[in-house]
Image (cartoon, rainbow, N blue to C red):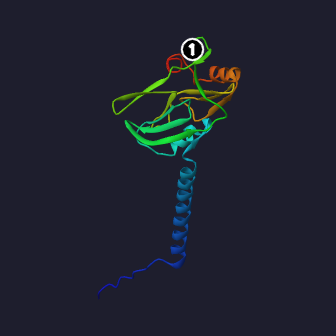
């Protein structure tokens, strides 16, 4: 006697659940992409790391800023991915770094080569695929914003608050922090 196989299809409830889950995922993805598209041309000092993280790159991303930190280009390796990004700030930004004595000093300008031409910029901020970033301290009207290499947190405050936060944490050590920029 031949065995009769019974094929059972999906029930209506199972189909509704799958469609609802797919709809929620699509909504989340599209809202995140539209949020990135709306705000992708204006950067604030505190949103730099979040902006770069949204690209989900498999290579190092570099934010190269010039013209008194008012214009920025996004690079993925040696390729410019996006240009004409604007740094939004309440005045001009200057890039600082700690010297080996713990004093904030002006950082040296960065240089980037494009089509064989050398361009001088105010700063270059790198985000690596594992989430680690280069260190960066920006000043605007006496207030500082520090992006530390081993943390997602952003430290803001005056010079004394910044120094206390960085010296009291394990993020700052002689080899990798003082030697940067």
- Name the residue located 55 percent from the left edge and 27 percent from the top edge: 136
User: Do we see residue 129 in this rendering?
Assistant: no
Is residue 169 shown left or right of residue 37? right
Looking at the rendering, in which quadrant would you find the N terminus?
bottom left
Q: Residues within 10 Å of mark 1 (few under 14, many from 20)?
A: some
- Name the residue located 53 percent from the left edge and 36 percent from the top edge: 71
Which element carries disc 1, helix, strand or loop? loop
- Where is residue 10 drawn, in percent x and y? 47, 77
User: Do we see residue 26 in this rendering?
Assistant: yes
Image position of 29 with respect to 126: above or below: below
Image position of 102 with respect to 116: above or below: above
Is residue 166 shown left or right of residue 63? right
Is residue 159 shown left or right of residue 3? right
Write down the residue under mark 1.
99
Name the residue furthest bottom.
Answer: 1
Counting labels gives 1
- Name the residue located 64 percent from the left edge and 35 percent from the top edge: 89
Towards the viewer: 49 or 165: 49
- Where is residue 137 drawn, in percent x and y? 59, 26
- Name the residue located 64 percent from the left edge and 30 percent from the top edge: 155
């Amino acid at each position: 006697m031949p065995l009769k196989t019974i094929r059972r299809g999906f029930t209506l409830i199972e189909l509704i659940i799958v469609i609802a889950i797919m709809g929620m995922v699509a909504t989340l993805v599209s809202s995140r992409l539209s949020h990135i598209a709306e705000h992708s041309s204006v950067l604030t000092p505190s949103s730099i790391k979040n902006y770069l993280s949204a690209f989900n790159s498999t290579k190092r991303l570099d934010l190269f800023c010039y013209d008194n930190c008012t214009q920025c280009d996004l690079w993925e390796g040696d390729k410019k991915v996006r240009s004409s990004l604007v740094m939004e700030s309440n005045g001009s930004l200057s890039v600082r770094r700690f010297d080996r004595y713990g004093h904030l000093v002006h950082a040296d300008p960065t240089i980037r080569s494009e089509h064989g031409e050398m361009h001088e910029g105010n700063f270059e901020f790198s985000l690596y695929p594992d989430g680690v970033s280069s260190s960066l301290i920006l000043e605007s009207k006496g207030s500082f914003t520090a992006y530390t290499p081993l943390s997602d947190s952003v430290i803001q405050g005056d010079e004394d608050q910044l120094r206390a936060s960085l010296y009291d944490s394990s993020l700052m050590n002689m080899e990798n922090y003082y030697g940067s920029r």
